[in-house]
Image (spheres, rainbow, N blue to C red):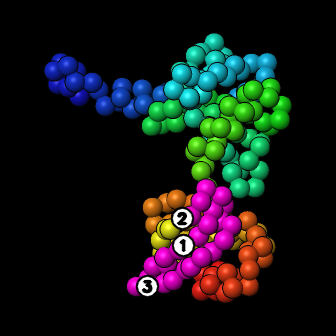
Amino acid sequence: MEDQRENGMPNLLDLQEFDEEALKKESEEVLQMRLLTADNAVFTRTQGGFLSLQFDGKNYDRVGVYLTFPLTNPQEFISIREADEKAKEIGVIRSLGDMPREVQDMVQEQVRLRYFMPVIRKVMEVKDEYGYAYWHVQTDFGSCRFTTHMGGDAVVSLGEARYQITDIDGNRYELPDLYALTVMERKKLDLFI
């Protein structure tokens, strides 16, 4: 150990203590829930259409919006995170309804971009070949064709008649009510649902 210090190399024990302290501090920060409210957080839209935040004496030029419960409770516990690869949480909006209307609109705009999920309105065709399902559907964004794996978790039930379909590229589609489709459309889905 003496040789390492003389050569400018740090002592392994010193590194371990430093890492423990940094880990302890980071753990405390992660475990602390900071609520963002209309009184302590100022959201603004950037020129590029992103969201920036001023909170707790800091300015965040760009932040990410993440839903804690995207399918069951998209209006509550919205996580606001730094916009880098670590996506460290800055704070949580307890309920979007508690924020001013302008902030609600900005946050919802970011949510729509992050959680883009077209709604399937009509099933034109679904066929399976070689372990894949090839879909042709009408969505609220127009006609769409995509491919899913057969089986697995490509089609997930979100409730009694509500489904989420994930294609091989990770894109998600929502089928809000299976029974809103015609009998012929539902028949096309027999293998998948």
Task: Mark yes or no: residue 30 visible.
Answer: no
Q: Give coordinates of residue 160: x percent, y percent.
A: 79, 73
Question: Please, what is the three-letter code of the amino acid marked with disc 1?
Answer: His
The disc label shown at residue 89, or none: none
Task: Mark yes or no: residue 179 visible.
Answer: yes
Q: Give coordinates of residue 21: x percent, y percent.
A: 49, 27
Q: Give coordinates of residue 8: x percent, y percent.
A: 20, 19
Q: Which of marks 2 and 3 is nearer the N terminus?
A: 3
The disc label shown at residue 129, or none: 3
- Against 68, residue 24 (above or below) is above
Residue at image x 36%, y 29%? 15
Does the CB distance between marks 1 and 2 fall below 8 Å? yes
Q: Which of pointers 1 and 3 indicates the residue nearer the eye?
A: 1
Q: Quadrant of residue 51?
A: top right
- Helix, strand or loop at mark 3: strand
- Against 13, residue 145 (above or below) is below
Question: Please, what is the three-letter code of the amino acid marked with disc 3?
Answer: Glu
Mark 2 Cα-neighbour bin, 10 Å: few <14, some 14–19, many ≥20: some
Question: Please, what is the three-letter code of the amino acid marked with disc 2?
Answer: Cys
**What residue is shown with label 2?**
144
Q: In which quarter of the image is the C terminus?
A: bottom right
Q: In which quarter of the image is the N terminus?
A: top left
The disc label shown at residue 136, or none: 1
Q: Give coordinates of residue 85: x percent, y percent.
A: 45, 37
Q: Which of pointers 2 and 3 indicates the residue nearer the eye?
A: 2
Residue at image x 68%, y 67%? 121
Magenta span covers which residues? 119-144
Residue at image x 74%, y 80%? 182
Q: Which of marks 1 and 2 is nearer the N terminus?
A: 1
